[in-house]
Structures are given as C-alpha cells and as structure tokens.
Amino acid sequence: MATVYEAIDRRLREFVLDQRVFFVATAPAVVDGHVNVSPKGMTGCFAVLDPLRVA
C-alpha cells in the first residue's frame, strides 16, 4: 500500500533530493498503449520547486 502525501514537507524534500536514481514514467491514454519507464540520476537534474511541484 502506498502512502499519499498532501505536500512535500522539509523532511520529504530532503529524502527525495538525497536519492541517486529516480524514474520518469509516461503512459498513453489508450487502453492498448505501452508504459515507458526511464531511469534518471544525474546530480542536479531533479528539483523540488515548492510543496506541490517538482521538475
């Protein structure tokens, strides 16, 4: 079971930014499409913009 957070607080922000690898996933709106998942992980390529947005 997943945990859903209302916003990114200080503790969660620090945890997220400490991770060396994260994954970006996209999925089409059609039923028979394929999900694409790509690992990412270069330093500085992930940012927490505010409590509700990441980039």
Image (cartoon, rainbow, N blue to C red):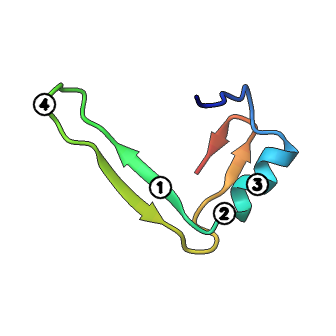
Name the amino acid type tagged 1. Phe
Name the amino acid type tagged 3. Phe
Kindly identify which residue carries mark 2: 19
**Which of marks 3 and 4 precedes in the sequence?**
3
**Which of marks 3 and 1 precedes in the sequence?**
3
Q: Crowding near pointer 1: few (<14 within 10 Å), some, many (20+)?
A: few
45 or 30: nearer the viewer = 30
Residue 16 image-quadrant placement: bottom right
15 or 9: nearer the viewer = 15
Label 2 close to label 1 by CB (< 8 Å): no
1 or 47: nearer the viewer = 1
Side of 19 relative to 28 (left or right): right
Label 2 close to label 3 by CB (< 8 Å): yes
Q: Residue furthest front?
A: 1
CA gap, disc 4 and disc 2: 33 Å
Which corner quadrant holds the N terminus? top right
The spot of residue 49 in percent (x, y) is: 70, 48
At x 66%, y 63%, the residue is 19
Name the amino acid type tagged 4. Asp
Kindly identify which residue carries mark 1: 23
At x 44%, y 52%, the residue is 24
Element class at badge 1: strand
Q: Residue furthest left?
A: 32
Element class at badge 2: loop
Side of 2 relative to 38 (left or right): right
Kindly identify which residue carries mark 3: 15
CA gap, disc 4 and disc 3: 35 Å
